[in-house]
Image (cartoon, coloured by chain):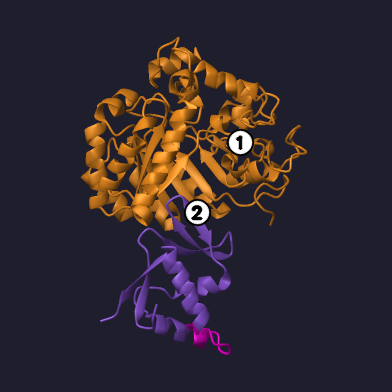
């Protein structure tokens, strides 16, 4: 997934904050996935508008210090492989 | 917070709420899991009462919501419940036979925020579908499947399997693929309720089950990721019991049409336990403190061979309702387990089902319910 790709949530999934679990979750037919803190931060920025590059930049600003690019791209690729998100091109 | 299946006193959150909004159903399926004495129950919860149940369960942490029954579409206030569920943040599922789903209602469900629809078929052929449900519904279901896709809902196609249709697994999967179902549930009959009454006529042979699993695996290889297929194994053929409900009152909460709160949809049949009604108590107390919900939480209730079994944290001793139905004591090991001293009753049931049927198959309807109850 390169910088220009724009990830969006797959049609059958819903992403939301669950107060009872104090975690972000993905809901889908017959199931629920509880996301860890950093996965939740990344998924919060997957809105079908922001490109991978923009998501990395936004996270970099929110959490300055370490270089987050590799981790973010790796998570998005895993999420894509699991079918949680799909990618489209800009323009 | 403790994990699901932990000791009583500190339960986790219910994650699933099954709202059995009515026991009324236009179909008469021979394998229905509804209680056989459903005609003897009290009045259905009102709209307001259901909305309160949805709110209270959501506060407890329930995130997945199934509208079931009976046929939930019999309730003409389902649209109101669906819209409230979306507002509360549930991921909601309509579990339906399709009877009563028309253009107007499905548009209202879309508008209200229903997330997906589970449509049942009884078979891939009109003849068997209509015979097993004792209705002429096959063509209607095909139309409803189209309607679901036109309105862009993810569709789970569910087919309950038994002796009479398990050899059609490949055709059932082909039908699901043609209908563009995203998920298929091939649910081998679980023997409770009406299915238990009809067990001799429904149990498949071991060879049938093996062939169906092979056909399912072949189909999985063919379709890949575009359709996910769940094959719910028939537990009578297993050596270990199912992890029923993921443990008693661990993550599942059922509320019945007449307001009873249950840790599973079969539990009202267990003797010696009284389950609270949502008309009398709030769900927080029901889930955390009521004696019924704590009866088989954790493992303090277990007898041998479960108590000292290393697998008890995996399957929780199986199903309490099945233990009661087949051994007379809900605290016994589920006799599906080969370590159970009562395991022979399952073998006997399989043997008995191989004999020519001695009694006619019984359809789920009001007259038969009254007869069985009376």
The range drawn in magenta is A59-69
Q: Secondary structure at mark 2?
A: loop
- Check if residue B160 falls in the magenta segment: no
User: Does any portion of residue B305 appear in the rendered image?
Assistant: yes
Residue at which label 1 appears: B241
Q: Name the residue that disc number 2 marks.
A: B63
Q: Is residue A61 magenta?
A: yes
Q: Position of residue A84 (x, y in %)?
A: 42, 64
Q: Is residue B176 above or below residue A87?
A: above
* Residue in view at x 40 percent, y 22 percent: B364
Q: Quadrant of the N terminus of chain B?
A: bottom right
Residues packed near mark 1 inside 10 Å, few (<14), some (14 to 19) or many (20 plus): many
Tint of chain A: purple
The picture places residue B289, in percent across and down from the top left corner, at 68, 43
> Label 2 marks which chain's residue?
B
Q: Is residue B315 left or right of residue B162?
A: right
Quadrant position of residue B224 = bottom left
């Amino acid at each position: 997934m390169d910088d220009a790709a724009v990830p969006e949530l797959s049609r059958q999934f819903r992403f939301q904050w669950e107060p009872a679990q104090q975690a972000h979750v993905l809901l889908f037919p017959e199931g629920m996935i509880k996301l860890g803190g950093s996965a939740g931060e990344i998924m919060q920025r997957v809105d079908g508008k922001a490109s991978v590059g923009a998501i990395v930049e936004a996270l970099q600003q929110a959490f300055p210090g370490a270089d987050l690019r590799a981790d973010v791209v790796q998570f998005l690729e895993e999420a894509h492989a699991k079918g949680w998100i799909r990618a489209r091109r800009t323009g | 917070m403790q994990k699901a299946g932990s000791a009583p006193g500190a339960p986790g959150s219910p994650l699933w709420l099954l709202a059995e909004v009515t026991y009324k159903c236009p179909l008469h399926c021979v394998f229905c899991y509804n209680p056989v004495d459903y005609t003897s129950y009290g009045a259905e919860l009102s709209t307001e009462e259901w909305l309160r149940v949805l709110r209270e369960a959501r506060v407890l942490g329930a995130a997945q919501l199934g509208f079931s029954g009976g046929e939930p579409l019999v309730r003409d206030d389902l649209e109101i419940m669906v819209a409230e569920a979306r507002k509360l943040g549930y991921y909601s599922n309509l579990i339906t036979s399709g009877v009563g789903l028309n253009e107007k209602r499905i548009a209202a469900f879309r508008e209200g925020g229903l997330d997906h629809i589970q449509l049942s078929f009884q078979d891939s052929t009109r003849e068997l579908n209509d015979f097993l449900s004792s209705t002429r519904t096959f063509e209607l279901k095909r139309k409803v499947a189209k309607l679901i896709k036109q309105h862009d809902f993810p569709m789970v196609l569910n087919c309950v399997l038994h002796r009479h249709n398990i050899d059609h697994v490949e055709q059932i999967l082909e039908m699901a693929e043609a209908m563009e179902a995203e998920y298929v549930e091939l649910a081998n009959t679980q023997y409770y309720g009406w299915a238990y009454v009809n067990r001799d006529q429904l149990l498949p042979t071991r060879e049938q089950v093996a062939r169906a699993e092979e056909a399912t695996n072949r189909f999985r290889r063919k379709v890949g990721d575009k359709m996910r297929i769940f094959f719910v194994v028939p537990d009578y053929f297993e050596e270990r019991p199912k992890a029923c409900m993921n443990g008693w009152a661990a993550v599942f909460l059922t509320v019945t049409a007449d307001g009873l709160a249950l840790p599973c949809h079969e539990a009202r049949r267990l003797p010696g336990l009284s389950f609270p009604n949502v008309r009398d108590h709030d769900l927080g107390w029901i889930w955390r403190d009521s004696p019924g919900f704590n009866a088989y939480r954790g493992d303090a209730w277990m007898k041998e061979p479960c108590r000292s079994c290393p697998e008890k944290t995996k399957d929780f001793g199986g199903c309490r309702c099945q233990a009661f139905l087949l051994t007379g004591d809900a605290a016994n090991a589920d006799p599906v387990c080969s370590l159970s001293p009562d395991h022979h009753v399952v073998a006997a049931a399989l043997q008995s089902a191989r004999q020519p049927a001695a009694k006619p198959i019984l359809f789920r309807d009001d007259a038969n319910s009254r007869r069985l109850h009376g």
